[in-house]
Amino acid sequence: METNTPSIIALNCSAATFSATATSGASYTAKASVPYTGGNGMVYAEGTAVTPSGVTGLTATLSAGTLSNGNGTASFAITGTPASAGTASFSISLGGQACALALPVAVSKASMSTLVCTAAPANGTIGVTYSGTATMAYTGGNGGTYDLSTATSTGVEGLTATVAAGTLANGSGTLVYTISGTPTSAGTATFALSLGGQSCTVTVTIAASGTATAAKDTVVIVYGGTTASVSNAFQDAGVSVAVSGADVTVTSTNTTKEIVYALSGISPKGSFKIYSQYKYNITLKGLSLTNSAGPAINSQSSKKGTINVVNGTTNTLVDGVTYTTSTEDQKGTFFSEGQLSFMGAGTLNVTGNNKHGIVSDDYIYVSEATINVKSAAKDGIHASDYFAMDNGTVTVTASDDGIEAEEGYIALNGGALTVNSVDDGITASYEGTDATITPYVLIKGGTINVATTGDKGNAIKSEGYTTITTNNPVTLAVSGKGAKGIKTTGDFTLNAGTIKITTSGAAYYVTADADIAAPAGINCDKNLAIKGGTLTITSTGAGGKGITVDGTATISGGNTTISATGAKYTYSSALTSEAKGFKSDGDFTMTNGELNIAATDDGLKSEKSITISNGTLNVTKSYEGLEAPTITIAGGVSNITATNDGINCSYGTVSGGTESNDGSNLFINGGIVIVTGSDAIDSNGNITIKGGTTIVCGPTNQPEEGIDYNGTFLVNGGTLISAGSNANMTKAMASTSTQVGMYLKSSTQLATTSILHIENASGTEMVTFKPKNAVYYFHFSTPNLAKGTQYKIYFGGSYTGGSFVGGSSGWGLYTGGTYSNSGATLKASPTTSATSTVNTLSL
C-alpha cells in the first residue's frame, strides 16, 4: 500500500509561468503554473495564502489537486493589487519541497486622479450563472495604456470582475468591468478594483435561490449559503428535519413509504444526514455541498437508498481533509450504512479529501447517471458488499483503489467506466475464511479503461475468479513496479471481448516478501482459459511477463498477442526475473485460436507439458521458443523463432550432465511445425515424429545443431526436413525408425541463397528446401521415400511459383511450384538401403 502523504523530489520555481501580466496599482488575478519532479501520485489539499516579500499587496494560494507519478505542474492562485513595480517573491511549498516564486510586476503606464463607480451591477442569485457589468468614471487620465486586469470577489465567492486592456483618455473617461461566474452563497460579493493608482469598491447583492416549496410525497430541502430551508410533507408521518445553519439532519420512523428527499442549492458549509427505518430516495436537483468537518451526505440508515441524479443537473459533493470526531461511521464524502443505488441522467461530482469518495457498508449499484469521483484520498468507490454497474458513466481518480468490493464481487454489465488509481483499479479484495463470500470480478459489458501507477498496483484484482465476456473494449494500463494488468487468485476465463493490457513497470525486490515482484499482463493463481476474444498484452519493463499461470492453461479460441520485451531483472545471482511471454506451472493445451508471442526470454514455457492439437502458434522472438518436459504437437501451425533452442524438452540438468537422457519427450503427430534457433530442436530426452510436417533450420556454426537429442530420435511418419551446422555431435535418427529417412552430411556449405532439392530417378520431387542461414547437415524423411530406390540430390537451382509451407517468411519447405536444376550442382545419386530405414550419406 502507498503512503497518503504527497511528496515530490523538486519544485522548480524558475520555470514557472503566469497566466497574466502583473502591473503596479492594477487589480490582479492569475494562475502560476509551477513544474515539479518526482511526484508520488497523492492528493494534496488547498494551501494557505502566502504573502510576498518585495512587492506587497498580493497573495499566492496552492490550488488543491493530485500529483502526477513523476513530473507535473502545480497551480497557485495569485490575487490582489501590487503596491509597486518590481518583483513579488512568494515562498511556496508542495510535497515537502519549497522554492521562491518570483512574479515580475511592471510599472503602470496608466495614471488617473479619481475613480468612481457610476453604474452599479445588477443583483444575482446563488448557484445561477451571473453576467453583468460595472461602469467606472475617472478623471485626470494620462492617456497611458493598461493591461487586462482581473479581481476576484470576496464575501460571496465564485465571481470575477475583468476590464479588458486599453488606453486611458487624456482627461476624463469611463472603464467597464465585466463581472461573471457562479456565486457560491447568498450575501454580498465585494470587488476591490484598482487601476492607474486609484481604487474603487464594487458590490453585487446575491440572493438565496428561494425557499423550499411544498411538494406532495417529497421532503424538499434547498441550500442557500450558510442556511437551508425545508418543506416537509411528512412532518406528521414520522419524519422530522433538524436544521443547524446549513447542516440538515433527517430522522424518519416511517416504515410504509419510500420517502423522497429532494436536495438542491449551494452551501460551502453544509451537509445532509439521514436516519431512516425504511428505504428512501435522495433526489439531487442541482446540489453543491461542501462539508469541511465530515461527509457531505451521511446516511446512518441500514436501508436501501436510491439516489436519483436528475437529468440536466450537475451536483457536487466535497468533504473536509479532517472530520469532527464521531462515534458513527463516516468513511467518505458520500457515506451510507445501507445499500446505494444510483439512477438518473444527471451528473454527480465527488471529491474525497478525507478517505473514500463514495462508500457503502453494504452494496453499491449504478443503473445510470454520470458519476465523477474527482479525487479521493483513499478509494474512489468502496463497497463492503458488492459493486455492480449496468449503465451510465463512472470516472474515478483515487490515491488508493479505484473501486473496491471489500467482502463481495464486482459485476460490470454496461456503461462506461474509467479508473485512474495508485493502487488497484478494480478489486474484489476479500481474503477471509467465510465460505459464504465469493469474491470475483465479472465483466459482461461496458467500455472499461483502467490505469494504475503504484508499485504492485493491479488494474483488475480478484481474490476469487475473473471472467470476461463482453462485446466492448477493456483497456488496462499499469506503470508501477511489479504491477499486473489482471491479478486473480482463482481461475481466469476470457470468452469474448477486445482486451488490451499494457505494463511498463519493472520487476523489483520486495523486502517484506523476501522475493521479487514481477509485472505481468495476467497473473492467474489457478487455471486459465482463453476461449474467444482478442487479447493483446504488451510488457516493456525489466523482468515483465505476458501471462503467468500457477495451474493449467488452455487456449481454445480467440486471438492472443503477447509482447514481453524488457531486459532481465537481477537482484542477486539467486533472484532474477526474465521477460517471458507465457508461463504455466501446469499443463498448457491449445486446441484452437491464435497465439502470437514475442519475448526476450522464453516464448511459451510449461513446467509440465505443452500440447497443441490445433490453432496457430507464432513465436516471433524468444531466447527459447517452447520449453516443457513433454511437448506434443498434433495439429495446427506452429512457427517458432528463437536465439537459443526453438523447441526444448527438458526436466532440467540431471545426474550425468546435460547430455544424459532425462526422460523428456517431444512428440510430433500432426500439424505444421516450423522451427529456427541455435539448437532448433533440443530434447534432453527423446524425439518421436509420427505425422505432420516438420521444418527446421538450425545454426551455421557448431557446436549447436539443427536437431539435438540425448535419448532416442524416431521418425515413424510425417515429413521432416531439418538443416543445421556440421557439429560432430549431430546424429542420425534412430535405426529403429519405421519410415525411410536420410541423414546428409555435406562437406561444403549450402548457402542461405541456395536450395536443397531431392528427386527420384524419374524426376519426381521429394523435397525442395531453402535454409534461413547457411547449413551443412540435414535430416530428411517423408512417406514417399522408399527402400532400394535411387535419388538425386542437388544444391542450387531455382524454384518458380509456389510458396513456403505454413507461411514461413524467406525460407522453408517449398510447395506448389516448379524446380529447375539449371545452374545446380548434383551432389550425389544414392540408392537407399534395401533393408535399413536410415541412410547416412556424405556429400
Image (spheres, rainbow, N blue to C red):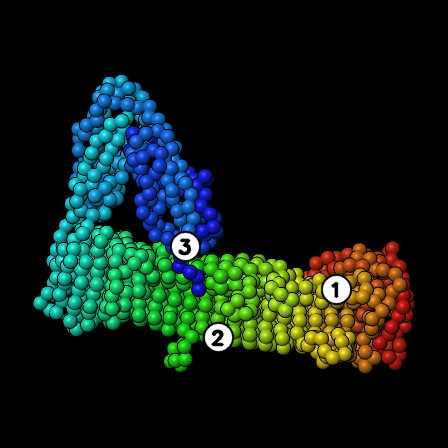
Residue underneath mark 2: 490
How crowded pointer 2 is (Cα within 10 Å; few <14, some 14-19, many 20+) is rated as many
- Residue at image coords 81%, 78%: 734
Query: Gap between marks 3 and 1, in whole Å?
Result: 51 Å
Picture layout, residue 155 above or below residue 774: above
Q: Position of residue 502 (x, y in %)?
A: 52, 59
Query: Furthest-top residue in view?
Result: 170
Q: Nearer the viewer, residue 156 or 842?
A: 156
| Residue at x-position 37% and y-position 73% | 407
Residue plotted at (72% across, 80% down): 663
| Residue that mark 1 sits on | 678
Residue that label 3 marks: 6
Going by the numbered disc 2, the residue's amino acid type is Gly
Disc 3 secondary structure class:
loop
Give the spatial CA distance, label 1 vs label 2.
38 Å
The three-letter amino acid code for the residue at tag 3 is Pro
| Quarter residue 725 falls in | bottom right
The image position of residue 472, as x and y in percent, is: 45, 61
